[in-house]
Amino acid sequence: MASDGRGAAITQAKLVLLGDMGAGKSSLVLRFVKGQFHEYQESTIGAAFLTQTVCADDRTIKFEIWDTAGQERYHSLAPMYYRGAAAAIIVYDIQSQSSFARAKSWVRELQKQGNAALVMALAGNKCDMEEKREVEREEAEAYASENGLFFMETSAKEALNVTELFHEIAVKLPKAPTPTNGPGVVLTNQNRTPQKSQCC
Amino acid sequence: MDQEYDAIILGTGLKECLVAGLLASVEGYKILHVDRNDYYGGESASLNLTQLHEKFAPEKAQDKAALTAKYGRWQDYNIDLVPKFMMGNGLLVRVLVRTGVHNYLQFRAAEGSYVQGKGGKIHKVPSNDKEALRSSLMGMFEKLRARSFFIFVQNFVETDPSTHGGYNLQRMPARDLYEKFGLAAETVEFIGHALALKTNERYLDEPAVDLVKAVRLYSDSMARFDTGSPYIYPLYGLGELPQGFARLSAVHGGTYMLAKSDVEVVYDEETGRACGAKSEGETAKAKFVVGDASYFPGKTQKVGQVVRALCLLSHPIPNVNDAESVQIIIPAAQCGRRHDVYVLGTSSAHNVCAKGRYFASVSTTVETNDPHRELEAGLRMLGPIDELFYNVTDVHAPLADGTADGAFISTGYDATTHFETTVRDVVDIYRRITGKELDLSKDDAAAANTSG
């Protein structure tokens, strides 16, 4: 449970996923969230975002994970999607050069937003499909380090590196909270969704 | 695009996105939503610095380096084409909570609410009995009369006639209710214009119950968030609202296409009903088509015109305590007009411009052939203006309600500074499409199975 006596504050962090249709964005999220939250069986259809809590070093990070809801399909993703994001995972399919090319264009799109504090992760998904690989690990690694992203190959199917990916992002989140415009107005008194933290 | 949908929606203005979000989340409709622009929001978008210049001063948009040198980063700007504030207890807040879209957005209070009184003096708007007693707007005896009016409004319950003061408020004109309380002309002016937010004097002859409810909305909005203001405003500008409702529609399976510059409605050759949309040689079919007037030439009429001046400043609006966000109402009578002039100010506090910059708008309903001049009373208040863009828009309304021809058309955005008429139009379109009333009396998210 979250309460372990140290009373560490929970840091909320918005995390967005970007990438080609079919690269496995939703499956990465569902693997990550479902693995720890069996009571949550929401599919991506109808879900605005999912939450999951991670402990990194001495901090507890509550990720608010946003999926594109298919709006990337016709290049119609709303700028609102990136607003206030602390982290972004750009996903491609290692079996597809074109999805890697699309990932690069998403990186450029994110860089255009000019949010210097954004933690960006590049995920080469479906790495269980080694025999059909089109994108070499070294190629992606080189691209990631040139552009200041951190890189991992993942498999949502085999649960490979999925938790590690999110954990690494949590570690990389800036310690000092990003300066915001102070507390806002909460339109409802209800808590969003009651969460149980199963880390620590 | 070559597919069949339940509904095709054209234009991603706030009204269209609200309709899309409601039809997708409440009715489960399969929706295709298309816009000719490459950004969300249509007429009600918030534009970044580049888009703003591309729209209003294309010659300056070319020299991006010069713009950056003068104003800072283009992406730090979110300038509303139709600036408004949200009433804290208004219909839009109810829809946001009911649909869960408030979870996608962040809001902050808009700080100040002011009204211009006699002699051009600007006063803070008193909204309840206690504030009335402190207000600089009125003399002592008038304060007491205003106080009893506020207490009357505060105690009013529409379904309980014993709170109606023995009046038939459904039949009594607003003018007579003021008279019963013996309120002076200046008090009537600020109550009608700065609290009830009536844009002109026609309401004086309309049922008093509407006035009472409008004043009550203001004071309930004051009370709801305890911020000292009835208004709230989303971070990054009003353009976040259509995007939020579009996302609601998308998470319920809606398909989104922007930058379809040639998109047009397809009508059935025999029946004349709107039955689809085509773009780039592809046609999508649907049971009906919803959209703003610009997508339905020949099916709307011009019902008015609104002029808005969008101004970039390097200082907060003077004489309102350096508020970072503010509304100032200039009642029509104070500037020799039939319609009020509205001044709205926002700033980097709401992430609508770069740090140290301010945005102000002045707007009104057009009455003459020289709309720019009609804003003078408001523009004078702003002090030096770095850059000013005029936006004169025709307000179009549909000729028919859409039930016969399957073309459900939204009315353009009027000069009011809040969203009550906006949401009412959407509720009406929703009813015309589905035959159902959208119940917004409760804004309890748990009461609706629609939260995302």
Image: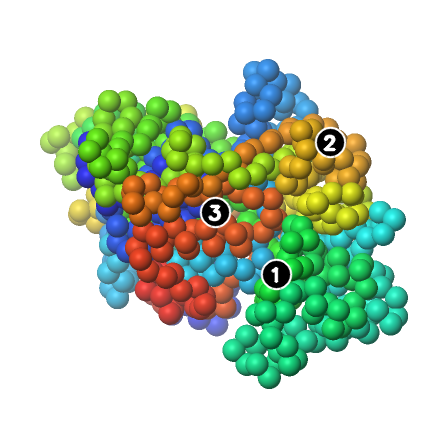
Kindly report the distance in space between the C-alpha atoms of the residues bearing marks 3 and 1: 32 Å
Q: For mark 2, what is the residue?
A: B373
* Residue where numbered disc 3 is placed: B241
Indicate the amino acid at tag 3: Leu
> Which residue appears at 31% of the width and 32% of the height?
B265
Give the CA separation, mark 2 to mark 1. 30 Å
Judging depth in this view, the residue of B123 and B173 nearest the camera is B173
Which of the two labelled residues, at mark 2 and mark 3, occupies the earlier sequence position? 3
Q: Label 1: few (<14), some or many (≥20) within 10 Å?
A: some
**Crowdedness of circle 3 by 10 Å Cα count: few (<14), some, many (20+)?**
many
Who's the residue at 56% across and 47% down the image? B235
Q: Position of residue B423 (x, y in %)?
A: 47, 53
Q: Which quadrant holds residue B227? A: bottom right
Q: Amino acid at mark 2?
A: Arg
Q: Which mark is residue B206?
A: 1
Q: Nearer the viewer, mark 3 or mark 1?
A: 1
Count the numbered circles shown.
3
A132 left or right, relative to B56: left
On the image, the x and y values in percent for residue A41 come to: 24, 60
Disc 2 on helix, strand or loop? helix
Q: Residue at x 68, y 33 (%)?
A: B368
